[in-house]
Image (tube, rainbow, N blue to C red):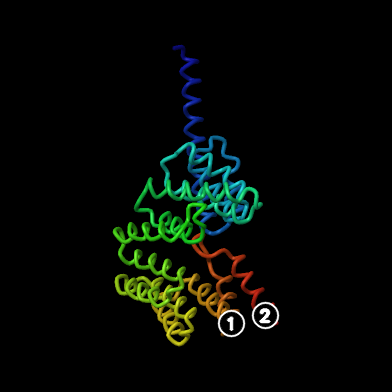
Amino acid sequence: MTNASVVRASVLLLLSATMALTDTQDWNQALMLYQRTEYRSSLEVLSPIAQKNASVFCLMGRNYFMMGDYKKAIQALSKSTAMEPGNADCVNWLGRAYGRQAETGSVVTAFGYATKARQMFEKAVALDPSNKRAMGDLLTYYLTAPEMLGGGIKRAQELAVRISRQDPAEGHFAQAQIEEKQRDYISAENHLRIARDLDPTNPKRLVDLAILLAKMGQFTESDGKFAQAASSTPVWPELAFERATAYIDEKRNLEQAKSLLQQYLRSQLTPDDPPRQDAETLLQKIKSCCP
């Protein structure tokens, strides 16, 4: 190899390393923006990346999903899972995107998208049986989809047994969802109380119980559980949202619900929190029923 060839090879190697470092820095910045729910800004960082890998496409898909553009989410997440078919998280996100497209798209395409959603959820669970998010999404699908689309109580019950083996508290929560679906609120309440006893430091268990008690008309105890959760976890935006939702569903304490939602919208949210537009929709609901 001539000296000129060595120089050219060295330059190309250096350029390749520099581009890889730049792409990594861009991805990290995009992830930070995503975590701050600045989805459009995150996409603006990701889109120019020349050599997009599975991680880039997965994050792009999640951004599109959070923005409500489910077709573009499907496109990006499909590319990600094609590159890394064993990535359970991205497979599960693809299932979510298919599911939302089934809900919001045309009646003609809904059946196909719903079927694909179930297939992706089941694949994600098969790839990583310990993935709680995937387990929860699959359980929700089984409880909401009709049997002709692969849903049904029987499948939900079978999945709840699997969940219980890994996490007994989460298993009781899953069983509570099944009982509530069948309108057996007493059994659902019992399962939620057991889940709380098994997982006493998790404030979400209190909130789950508070929500169900409100549906059952046990408002005094429900309010007490919400207050207990707020006391144990003062900085938790989702609590304000869930409490406001419970009040609105039961058409009570609407001024407090309004205040809670305004507090929620002022909070620093993450992608794991309910979307801001959901809180804004609830505020509109309060205005429409009690101007």
SS at circle 1? loop
Q: Which percent across, then down, holds residue 201?
A: 33, 72
125 and 131: which is toward the camera: 125
Q: Which percent across, then down, holds residue 73?
A: 58, 48
- On the image, numbered disc 2 is attached to which residue? 289
The extreme top residue here reads: 2
Q: Residues within 10 Å of mark 1 (few under 14, many from 20)?
A: few
Is the residue 87 above or below the residue 211 in the image?
above
SS at circle 2? helix
Q: Which percent across, then down, holds residue 80?
A: 50, 41
> Residue 166's mark?
none
- On the image, numbered disc 1 is attached to which residue? 251
Instruction: Tell me, yes or no, whether the two marked residues, 2 and 1, touch with CB atoms within 8 Å.
Output: yes
Residue 195 located left or right of residue 81: left
> Please, what is the three-letter code of the amino acid marked with disc 2?
Cys
Distance (Cα) linking label 2 and label 1: 9 Å
> Please, what is the three-letter code of the amino acid marked with disc 1?
Lys
Q: Residues within 10 Å of mark 2 (few under 14, many from 20)?
A: few
* Residue at 55% from the left image edge and 47% from the top image edge: 61
Q: How many marks?
A: 2
* Residue at 63% from the left image edge and 70% from the top image edge: 280
Q: Quadrant of the N terminus?
A: top left
Q: Quadrant of the C terminus?
A: bottom right
* Residue at 36% from the left image edge and 70% from the top image edge: 202
Q: Which percent across, then down, holds residue 175?
A: 38, 66
Identify the mark nearer the N-term, 2 or 1: 1
68 and 6: which is toward the camera: 68
